[in-house]
Amino acid sequence: MKHSIGGICVSIVQKEQHKPREGFATSLGVITATLGSAVGLGNIWKFPYMTGENGGAAFILVYLLCVILVGLPVMISELIIGRTTQANAITAFKRLAPNRPWYLVGVSGTAASFLIMAFYTTVAGWVFSYIFKAASGVISTTDPEVTTQVFKTSMSAVWSPLLWQWFVLLFTGSIIMLGVTKGIERITKTLMPILFLLLLICVIRALTLPGASEGLKFLFRPDFSKITGATILTAMGLSFFKLSVGMGTMITYGSYFGFRENIPYTAVKVMLSDTLVSILAGMAIFPAVFAFGFKPDAGPSLLFITIPTVFASMPLGNIFMVLFFLLVSIAATGAMISLLEVPVAYFTEELKWSRLKATLVTIISIALVGTTATLSFSTLGDTKFFDKTFFDLYDFLTSNILLPVGGLLITYFIAWKWGLKNIAREASNNGSLSNQPVINIYFFIVRYLAPIAITLILLNGLGFIKI
Ligand code: TRP
């Protein structure tokens, strides 16, 4: 019944605006936009450095379990909520549970998108600036000391990282201003194929380095002694971050899906392709780490100090290096537009702002918060909360707390409040798909397995209980 209430609301809203709601026009666009959101700095920056810090293959296995048992079910749940309600993350809950506090899940998710963007744009700024560093030749060296020094100097400056961060915001903001079909869909359709091609080129180059096999061993041979409660929480946090779930990005994108799209199938495709990109990124980075004698646990700087050395030793290395950082910039762009779209969709739909105003207000607010993240590597380096700089705090708070809690509430809501009948109708496109077995497995996971697993991993990782 609640669903039909949602349906009525949609038609009223559409009449008021005298135009149909924008969405992704093609199935290909649905895939490229959703995958474009999932693939990002998470694959090429976070995944490799976290794998490096947490001991390699064993961490990857825990991560994969989290992706399949928790991340994917949350993703399907969000897409279902979005498409059913045809609304942004906050309004979606208002439609499904009118006069109940569930919309606060959307509010907290929208707030999380600002916090994620605050540190994400810092790193994206470094990446964009590295395109030019690579082109100019300053990092064309196989000497780790030099690449380390260049990285330290450039991120501890005050103005240049800030200007890059603001540039990144303006750049992604201008794509968002173009709208859902002409902005998000069109841009990701063009960029995603380029991204895959560039990634393959980089992997082939890295695998043909002498000593590449050490890196592959690290990536594929598990050592379970490295796994602790905190590691498992990190892996789960990464799985949420990777699949862009737990805060409403997928609710927002799901609301742009056509009614013919097969939601569970699309989510599985996106999850598999995203995981493939992470593994390929690992295969581009770890051979170089071992070939040139770097430590795999260098942390967030890993990408910036190792990758230049992969290319520096080869003919036309500079060109490949430029291509690599271009690839990372492309990946980051697809992810950032999906993060921006969450507040922008709310502002335009609920507050009736123009897309221009909504985008400007969003990027200016992010620039303000984001400045504290960027300056964490220079003037604000000593300002710490719980022993974390602003940058680390935003990262930890979102990945390890806000996203898992959001995911927990979303699975609880869909499985216990909304229920199997509604889920089955939406996930089967009103019965036109015969995917009942898939829906049953999904329902079991979101009703029992995912909420219990998220709760235990959270409490254990934060030290409240010991398993
Ligand atoms: N998934 C993206 C990445 O891996 C980041 C991202 C985009 C994200 N949208 C999100 C993370 C929403 C959490 C929530 O880089």
Image (spheres, rainbow, N blue to C red):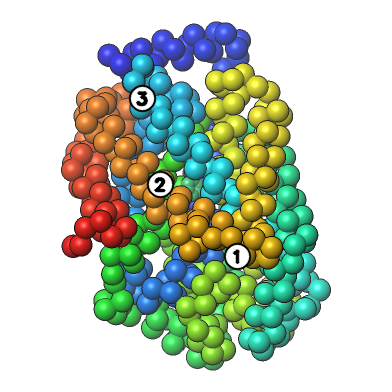
- Relative image position of residue 264 (x, y in whole percent): 34, 41
**Closest to the observer: 318 or 125?**
125
Image side of residue 211 versus residue 455, left or right: right
* Residue 296, above or below 440: below
Type of amino acid at the residue the image marks with label 1: Asp
The residue wearing badge 2 is: 403
Where is the N terminus found, in terms of image quarters? top left
The secondary element bearing badge 2 is classed as helix
Q: Counting other residues with Cα less than 10 Å from the Cα at mark 1, is it few (<14), some (14-19), or many (20 or more)?
A: few
User: From the Cβ of disc 1, is ligand 1 less than 8 Å away?
Assistant: no
* Residue 61, above or below 222: above
Q: Residue 99 appears in which quarter of the rendering?
A: top left
CB-based contact (under 8 Å), mark 1 and mark 3: no
Q: Counting other residues with Cα less than 10 Å from the Cα at mark 2, is it few (<14), some (14-19), or many (20 or more)?
A: many
Where is the C terminus found, in terms of image quarters? bottom left
- Relative image position of residue 391 (x, y in whole percent): 56, 58
Give the Cα separation between the discs numbered 3 and 2. 18 Å
Residue at the farthest right position: 136
User: From the Cβ of disc 2, is ligand 1 less than 8 Å away?
Assistant: yes
Type of amino acid at the residue the image marks with label 2: Leu
